[in-house]
Image (cartoon, rainbow, N blue to C red):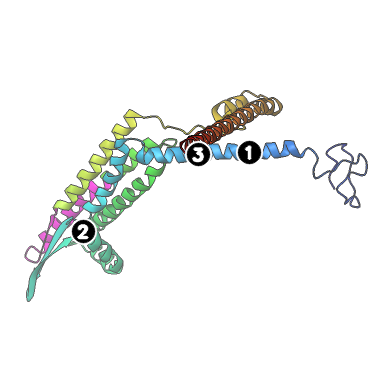
Amino acid sequence: MANCPACGKHLKLTDYKPNCPYCGVNIPYYNIEERLQEEADVAEVEHVKVQKKIDRLKASFVGSPLTIIRIFLSLLPIGALMLPLCSITFSGPMIEQRTTDVNAIFLYDYVSKLNFDNLFTMIGTKLVGAGFTALLVAVAATLLSAVMVLVSFIAITCANGPKGKIRNIINNCIAIVFAVIAPVAFTKFASAVNAAFPQFFSGKIGVGIFVYIATLVILLVLNIIIAKKNEPVKYKQCYVGGIPAEEYEEMIANGVSMEEIHKKMDVILAKKDAERTAEEERKAAERKAKEEEELARKAGVTAEDSDKE
């Protein structure tokens, strides 16, 4: 069993009553005001932490015109992936020539149905092995670049957090690197297969990949500009027991005792209560004065009507 918080005597299993058998203090309610105040302090400190995160989140999205523009620019690369990234032309004996434009939707459908056994078999051949290895690199690089675009968009939510700005720039750079690797690898694949089957296959880069890379570069430049401007986050003023949160944190860091902090809180809260009471009394006096003025006005009107009669 525990000890009595008042006298420190050890309590037995038979001491189940709320009052201490030694000093008679009510154990559940002992020092309850101080404990409630401590719990209130903890709740307000947690509120301050959450509010700062909310303020940083708001600043990341709508903190300035540049951050608002960044939201739309972060979505542009996804739209660019819907454009033709490349085109592939097939032809052959008794096969009508057909050209297929490849975009993100086609690529997703292609990967979901891809027979990797056949792909690795083609990679293992001497004739087009290097070409199909390059194709695998091109597909992987495109998908990884798209993933980094999504990661960058999600990372905007914590752009004003610790290392948030540099993280956005790094994410953009990685997306651009993969986006550049993809067309280079595809060109190598198209050249290798075209060299092996010049009459049956050809491939060329589409305008979509250039638009995609351009949107990524623009987004990178914008993130660099935002990082250089480094506009401060506008934090909402929060209080802990009536003390400004910044001052409270400074007092804790300087080792000020909670007893002294609570004394200061009591003074501040008492002053606020007095101000609130004075304001309520002032408003009540104004209401009473208006009521008396209205009654006097009505009484004057009634007197005039009586004189006319």
Q: Earlier in the sequence, mark 2 or mark 1?
A: 1
Of label 1 and label 3, which has the lower sequence position?
A: 1
- Secondary structure that dominates the magenta span: helix
Report the residue marked by disc 2.
103
> Which residues, given as a range, are shown in magenta?
177-206
User: Residue 58, how many percent across, how many down?
Assistant: 40, 40
- Residue 22, image x and y in percent? 93, 41
Residue type of the residue flagged with mark 1:
Val
Q: Name the side, left or right, on which 307 lies relative to 71.
A: right
Query: Quick check: is 252 in the magenta stretch?
Result: no
Closer to viewer: mark 2 or mark 3? 3
Q: Secondary structure at mark 3?
A: helix
Image mark for residue 42 = 1
Q: Could you tell me which secondary element the residue under label 1 belongs to?
A: helix
Residues marked 2 and 3 touching at CB (< 8 Å): no
Q: Is residue 159 visible?
A: no
Residue 184 on the magenta segment: yes
Please indicate, yes or no, whether residue 39 appears anywhere in the rendered image. Answer: yes
| Distance Cα–Cα, label 1 vs label 3 | 14 Å
Q: Earlier in the sequence, mark 2 or mark 3?
A: 3
Under mark 2, the amino acid is Asn
The residues bearing labels 2 and 1 have C-alpha atoms spaced at a distance of 53 Å
Q: Few, some or many C-alpha atoms within 10 Å of disc 2 (few <14, some 14-19, many ≥20)? A: some
Q: Secondary structure at mark 2?
A: loop
Query: Which residue is nearer to you in this view: 286 or 179?
Result: 286
Amino acid type of the residue tagged 3 in the rendering: Gln
Residue placed under numbered mark 3 in the picture: 51
Q: Most extreme residue toward the right, as rendered?
A: 22
At 52% across and 41% down in the image, what residue appears?
A: 50
